[in-house]
Image: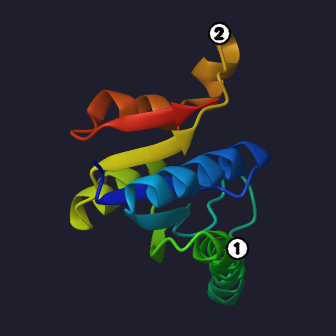
Amino acid sequence: MYQRILVATDGSTLSKKAVNSAIALAATCTAELIALKVVPRYPQAYFEGSIPLSAQEIARVEKQWTESAQAQLASVVKQAKAKSVRTQAITVKSDVVSDAIMATAKKHKADLIVMASHGRKGIKRLLLGSETQQVLTHSHIPVLVLR
């Protein structure tokens, strides 16, 4: 049915449920799992008059984010390996999570994207945005959304 399943994770409890479901589905289909963590490119100052970060501070924060992402993905790989699921762990730097998810799915020829949704409504959805909604709207491959 599916040959490659991409699962996007942010390390949250909700995304861990999506990871578990993706692993179970990959095991059932004997599909390869692509575990993806998107990290921001660099810290940005959002407020007028804020103190800009030095190059060393930016490098330190980026390194911390990358190490955290690698630890999260290592956990996914360990879980998948326990279920005999072949897994690739990929960290991508991008400020637009939805674009990074779709680009990675295309690059690695995934035939399904699995991700979680917080199910926000109203003003929270408007203010916080929805990466899941963007992927659902613009993806050219099937998307499985778990709440």
Q: Marks 1 and 2: which is nearer the front?
A: 1
- Among the 4 quarters of the image, the one containing residue 143: top left
Residue at numbered disc 1: 75
Crowd tier of the residue under label 1, counting other residues whose Cα lies within 10 Å: few below 14, some 14–19, many 20 or above: some
Q: Quadrant of residue 122?
A: top right
Residue at 28% from the left image edge and 38% from the top image edge:
139
Give SS at disc 2: helix
| 47 sits to left or right of 143 | right
Local packing at callout 2 (Cα closer than 10 Å; few below 14, some 14-19, many 20+) is: few
Report the front residue among 97 and 33: 33
Q: Nearer the viewer, residue 54 or 71?
A: 71
Residue 128 locus on image (x, y percent): 64, 30
* Residue 140 image position (x, y, % from top left): 21, 39
Q: Which mark is residue 122?
A: 2
Left or right, 42 with respect to 108, comes to right
Tell me, for residue 118, which label it has, or none.
Answer: none
Instruction: Count the labels in the image.
Output: 2
Q: Are marks 1 and 2 in contact (CB under 8 Å)?
A: no
